[in-house]
Amino acid sequence: MGRGDVDGTDSKVVDALQQEAQARLAANIFRLRAEKGWGQEEASWRAQVGIRAFQRLETARKVNPTLVTLARLAAAFGVDIPDLLVPSPLPPRRGPGRPRKRSVAPEQVAMTADPPKE
């Protein structure tokens, strides 16, 4: 099982706690970045964290940041490390965006086009 447990219960608790911490960190990074008006590239540059790592942190994708990374993030945003992990309201979801273009077969275009006028 790993992590010193017998029936898997402890690892489930640890996994749940880790996911909660990742979600809190992601929400706080997103919120702080929005408050500063920074894009992801600027925030990652100021925190001296690679852009891909920053994107993973902000979206809570299977990350396990080091204490150095947390310290860099905190310094960049002007907060203390614990402030990155406090419960935060979830960031607002983005709108639906632009609709995707649908590919249409040429014969379908010909069928829907108006017939030529004489």
Image: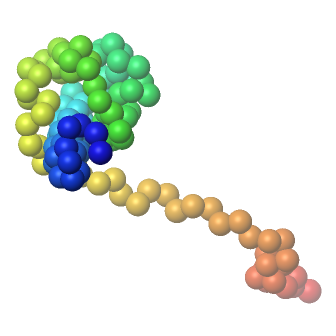
Task: Give residue 105's quadrant in the image.
Answer: bottom right
Residue at screen point 57% across, 61% down: 100
Taking 54 as reference, is 89 left or right?
A: left
Does the rendering let one see residue 8?
yes
Taking 94 as reference, is 33 left or right?
A: left
Residue 40 in picture, x, y percent from top left: 36, 29
Residue 63 in picture, x, y percent from top left: 33, 33
Residue at screen point 9% across, 42% down: 87
Taking 77 as reference, is 53 left or right?
A: right
Task: Give residue 59's quadrant in the image.
Answer: top left
- Judge by depth and name the residue closer to the eye, 46 or 12: 12
- Judge by depth and name the residue closer to the eye, 58 or 11: 11
Residue 72 in picture, x, y percent from top left: 23, 15
Task: Locate the C terminus by quadrant.
Answer: bottom right
The residue lying furthest to the right in this view is 118
Residue at screen point 41% across, 60% down: 96
Task: Give residue 53's quadrant in the image.
Answer: top left
Q: Total number of numbered labels? A: 0
Residue 110 in picture, x, y percent from top left: 84, 78
Task: Locate the N terminus by quadrant.
Answer: top left
Taking 7 as reference, is 81 left or right?
A: left
Does the rendering let one see residue 76?
no
- Judge by depth and name the residue closer to the eye, 46 or 19: 19
The residue lying furthest to the front in this view is 6
Q: Is residue 58 above or below residue 97?
A: above
